[in-house]
Image (cartoon, helix red, strand yellow):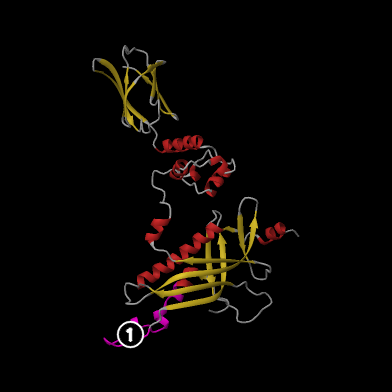
C-alpha cells in the first residue's frame, strides 16, 4: 500500500488477511485424487503493526479506519503504530 | 501542564475521545462484516477460512473525567501513550444464548428510556447490570438491597416500579369509547368500554367514583370495566365518573344520556 493511500475500513483488512485461498494453495482449491494425501494450511497467525484512525461522531459512535504501516522509512513525524493479531483457521 | 490540560490539548476537535463500549461496538461490527464476507465465500469454496481470534494493541491516552474513563487515540508525533490490549475470541450463537441475558423484547421498558430518572441513577443502575424492568425484577427476586448496591444513587424498587409502570402506560394509553347502563342480576350496572383500560393487576384497582361516590367494580378487563351503580339515575346534566385504572392512571369523564 503506498504511503499516501487512504485508510480503509478495518473489515476490509481483516477479510483480506483471511482470504487464504487467493494467495496460497490449500488442498481445498486443488484437485486431489482419491486416496492421495495433501497438506493444507489449518491455522494462520497474522501479526501486523497497524495505522488506525478512530473517528467519534457527535452521538458517540466510533468509526474505525485502518491501514498497514504506510511509511517504509523513519521520518520526522512517525505515525503511531497500533497492532493487530489475527488467528485464521479452517471453518468447520 | 497538568495531565488533564495535556489531554484537553490532545482532544482538539479532530481527534475526539471515545468510550470503551463505542469502540468495542464498532470493532465488533467491523469483524462481523469481515466474517460475513468470508461466510459468503464459504458457499462457493470447498474449504474456507474464518477469523477465529483477534488481538488488538491500541496506543491511546486514557482520560478520567470523574464519571467515566474515555480514550483518545494517539496521533503521529505524540509520545507517552498507553497500550490498550483487546483479545476477541469467536463465540457461537448457541453460547451467546446460554451465557448472555435475553435481548430486550418489544414491550420491555429500558432504564435508559425512563425520562424521570436522572443520569446518575441510570449510570448507577447500569453499573450493577440493571438495564430493563426485567433485570430489576430479577434482582428484586434475589432480595438485593438496590440503594446500598448503587451507593444510594438509585431510587428504591417501588419508586422504580412506579416509573416503569408509568413509562409502560405511556405506550398503551387508555381509551374510552362508550358507556352503557344495563340491568344484571337485578342490579344496575354501568359498563365502560374502550381499550387498554385495566391492563395491570394492582390491589384496590380499578377504583371508581361516580358523582363523588365510590362504586364497587364488578369486573375489569382491558376492553371493559363494569361498575355496580345501584340507585343511579341518569340526569340531564352530565354525571362525573372518575376511574383510577391503576395507581398511575386516572380517567375522568362526563356521562349523559
Q: Is residue B13 above or below residue A12?
A: above
Foreground residue among B123 and B25:
B123
The location of residue A80, given as percent across then percent down, is 62, 71
Q: Which residue is mark 1?
A: A30
Q: Residue furthest right?
A: B1
The location of residue B223, given as percent across then percent down, is 31, 31
- Dot 1 falls on a residue whose secondary structure is loop
Residue drawn at 69 percent across, 77 percent down: A76
Q: Is residue A71 above or below residue B34?
A: below
What's drawn in magenta, residue-wise? A15-39
**Residue B235 falls left or right of residue B164:** left
**Residue B237 falls left or right of residue B157:** left
Q: Residue furthest front?
A: B143
Q: Quadrant of residue B149?
A: top right
Q: Quadrant of residue B9?
A: bottom right
Please identify the dominant SS of the magenta region. loop
Locate the N terminus of chain B and report the quarter of the image it occupies: bottom right
Q: How many marks?
A: 1
The location of residue B161, given as percent across then percent down, is 47, 36
Report whether residue B118 is seen: no
Q: Quadrant of residue A34?
A: bottom left
Which chain hosts label 1?
A: A
Locate the C terminus of chain B and report the quarter of the image it occupies: top left
User: Does the segment drawn in magenta span residue A23?
Assistant: yes
The location of residue B132, given as percent across then percent down, is 46, 45
Residue drawn at 50 percent across, 64 percent down: B27
Foreground residue among A15 and B206:
B206
Amino acid at each position: 500500500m503506498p504511503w499516501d493511500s487512504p485508510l480503509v475500513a478495518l473489515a476490509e483488512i481483516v477479510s483480506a488477511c483471511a482470504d487464504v485461498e487467493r494467495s496460497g494453495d490449500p488442498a481445498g482449491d486443488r484437485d486431489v485424487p482419491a486416496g492421495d494425501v495433501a497438506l493444507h494450511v489449518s491455522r494462520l497467525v497474522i501479526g501486523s503493526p497497524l495505522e488506525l484512525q478512530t473517528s467519534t461522531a457527535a452521538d458517540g459512535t466510533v468509526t474505525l479506519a485502518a491501514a498497514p504501516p504506510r511509511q517504509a522509512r523513519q521520518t520526522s513525524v512517525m505515525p503511531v503504530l497500533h497492532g493487530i493479531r489475527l488467528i485464521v483457521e479452517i471453518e468447520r | 501542564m497538568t495531565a488533564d490540560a495535556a489531554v484537553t490539548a490532545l482532544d482538539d476537535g479532530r481527534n475526539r475521545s471515545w468510550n470503551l463500549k463505542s469502540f468495542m461496538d464498532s470493532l465488533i461490527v467491523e469483524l462481523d462484516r469481515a466474517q460475513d464476507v468470508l461466510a459468503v465465500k464459504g458457499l462457493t469454496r470447498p474449504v474456507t477460512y474464518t477469523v477465529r481470534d483477534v488481538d488488538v494493541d491500541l496506543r491511546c491516552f486514557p482520560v478520567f473525567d470523574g464519571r467515566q474513563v474515555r480514550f483518545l487515540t494517539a496521533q503521529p508525533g505524540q509520545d507517552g501513550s498507553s497500550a490498550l490490549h483487546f483479545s476477541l475470541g469467536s463465540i457461537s450463537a448457541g453460547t451467546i444464548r446460554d451465557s448472555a441475558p435475553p435481548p430486550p423484547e418489544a414491550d420491555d421498558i429500558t432504564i435508559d428510556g425512563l425520562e424521570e430518572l436522572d443520569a446518575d441513577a441510570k449510570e448507577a443502575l447500569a453499573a450493577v447490570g440493571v438495564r430493563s424492568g426485567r433485570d430489576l425484577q430479577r434482582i428484586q427476586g434475589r432480595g438485593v438491597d438496590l440503594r446500598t448496591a448503587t451507593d444510594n444513587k438509585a431510587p428504591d424498587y417501588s419508586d422504580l416500579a412506579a416509573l416503569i409502570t408509568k413509562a409502560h402506560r405511556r405506550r398503551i394509553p387508555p381509551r374510552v369509547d362508550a358507556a352503557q347502563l344495563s340491568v344484571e342480576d337485578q342490579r344496575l350496572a354501568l359498563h365502560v368500554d374502550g381499550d387498554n383500560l385495566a391492563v395491570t393487576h394492582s390491589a384496590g384497582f380499578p377504583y371508581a367514583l361516580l358523582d363523588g361516590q365510590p362504586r364497587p367494580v364488578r369486573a375489569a378487563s382491558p376492553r371493559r370495566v363494569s361498575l355496580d351503580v345501584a340507585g343511579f339515575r341518569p340526569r340531564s346534566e352530565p354525571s362525573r365518573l372518575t376511574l383510577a385504572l391503576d395507581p398511575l392512571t386516572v380517567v375522568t369523564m362526563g356521562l349523559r344520556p
